[in-house]
Amino acid sequence: MFGNKVKRATASLNLHAATSNKNAKRKADGSPGKEIKRFALGDISNATKNENVPVAGKAKGKDAILKPVQPKLATRSSKVKDVKATTLKKENKVTKPTLKVVKPKVPTGRVTRSSSSGATLIKPEAVTGEEDVSLLYTTAIETTDSDESLTLSSTELALNSKNIKLTEEVKKALPDGVFDFDNECGDDPFQVGLYAQDIFDYYKTRELKFPVSKYLTSQTELNKGMRSILVDWLVEVQESFELNHETLYLAIKLVDLFLGKVQIKRDKLQLVGTTAFWIAAKFDERTSPSIDDFCYICDDAYTMQSIIKMEIKMLKTLQYDIGIPLSYRFLRRYARCAKLEMETLTLARYILESSLMEYEFIDVRDSLIAGAALLLALCMNGVEKPWTPTLAHYSGYSDTDLFDLANRLLNMLRTPPPQVKTIRTKYSHRIFYEVAKIPLPDEIKL
């Protein structure tokens, strides 16, 4: 569908050569390479390569090269520095600054627990004049309703994460047959087992604040095929830059939310996708690619100024609220709680990532489609009773809630779009256990 108008690079884009990220993740051995330096929507968007960008050898002589525009940093006026230095010199006050280090002290006090608010107040003992009151660990509570108190030493006040365990009073009552995954991770501070379920319950309430509508009815110049091509190209960008999968999912979500509120012409569609990916990378990545890299992968069809303008417009339209719950996070949570094998999780990821290209799934809740993708993956692996009580508890959905959506995902895999094959090729590689080659079942049996 791209045709001969799509411009491709002569060599595949390598992260260490195309980006300025020196601390990026190393590409896995045998990882499939991609050629993404192209204008993905050239044949259907009527957009051409930007003519305003200077080209090497055409600006000022043969040796002219394109240099990125460096922003000018605001500096203090030299006149102000001279006047200040002269004044200090006349007053003989030019001395070296000294730094006084105050060693914090852990107070010994009475710990009083409030029965009404549940907060803890540490009432310090008498403080001498040499001690800084701001260093004491106190709260804003001034009065308590309970006289229950105990005296703790300074050593006992120091929290040790290894001694924090879930007690019988803190643990929630679990149904029969449910594996207590969070309690097993209670000693691991990185798993936050005490708060994990509350975090994902909050995610499920927050995802209702980001509804995506079927916006193509109001977009006069866009269609489903254009969106599928854009998503297919974004998957190539994610693979070549070796970015997190969360970055890909967030970028596509930003595109759908933005197109649901703003009408875009077809020659600006890839600009919207590129800008969304740039915002998502800065939000989720430890070190994101630079704006020059995003101009490069578009084959200089857009300038840095156009990407920055689109970024401002997109963030204003979305009211700067881009902390969106993603289906990928829900899927990983479900699989980890059920202790599923990596092959099963990868198959579910393939199904879920394939659904990103389909316009019919954009209005489905992320937590719901993540559960349906995992249910279909378990059925494809021949599991007799795929949806266990553990999965039902941690996901909040029963197998009957996911059955219809899982069938829709199965039909999607049976009839993939012919013009986009990046995701299927990606998951046909041995790194991803070749899950795309697994035969599809005739039907789903619960």
Image (cartoon, rainbow, N blue to C red):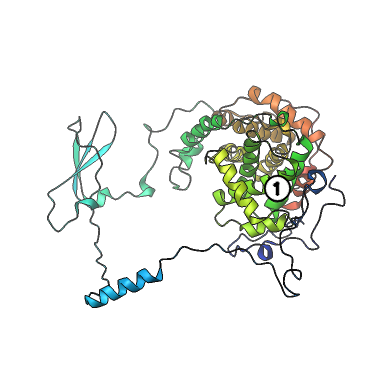
Q: Is 222 drawn above or below residue 55 in the view shown?
A: above
Can residue 65 be seen?
yes
Q: Position of residue 99 (x, y in %)?
A: 27, 68
Can residue 178 be seen?
no
Q: Helix, strand, or loop for circle 1?
A: helix
**Quarter occupied by the C terminus:** top right
Q: Position of residue 273 (x, y in %)?
A: 68, 45
Q: Is 214 drawn above or below residue 93 in the view shown?
A: above
Q: Count neighbours of disc 1 (C-alpha within 10 A) and say few if under 14, some if 14 to 19, many if 20 or more.
A: many
Q: As drawn, is 35 to the left or to the right of 332?
A: right
**Quarter occupied by the N terminus:** top right
Quadrant of the image occupied by residue 376: top right
Residue projecting furthest to the top:
400
How many numbered circles does the render carry?
A: 1
Q: Is 345 drawn above or below residue 19 in the view shown?
A: above
Q: Amino acid at mark 1?
A: Leu
Q: As drawn, is 152 to the left or to the right of 301?
A: left
Q: Which residue: 72% across, 28% down?
A: 217
Quadrant of the image occupied by residue 165: top left
Q: As drawn, is 126 to the left or to the right of 17?
A: left
Q: As drawn, is 246 to the left or to the right of 167?
A: right
Query: According to the image, label 1 marks what residue?
Result: 234
Along the viewing direction, whichever of 410 and 132 lies nearer the viewer:
132
Along the viewing direction, whichever of 243 and 18 lies nearer the viewer:
18
Q: Position of residue 66 (x, y in %)?
A: 69, 67
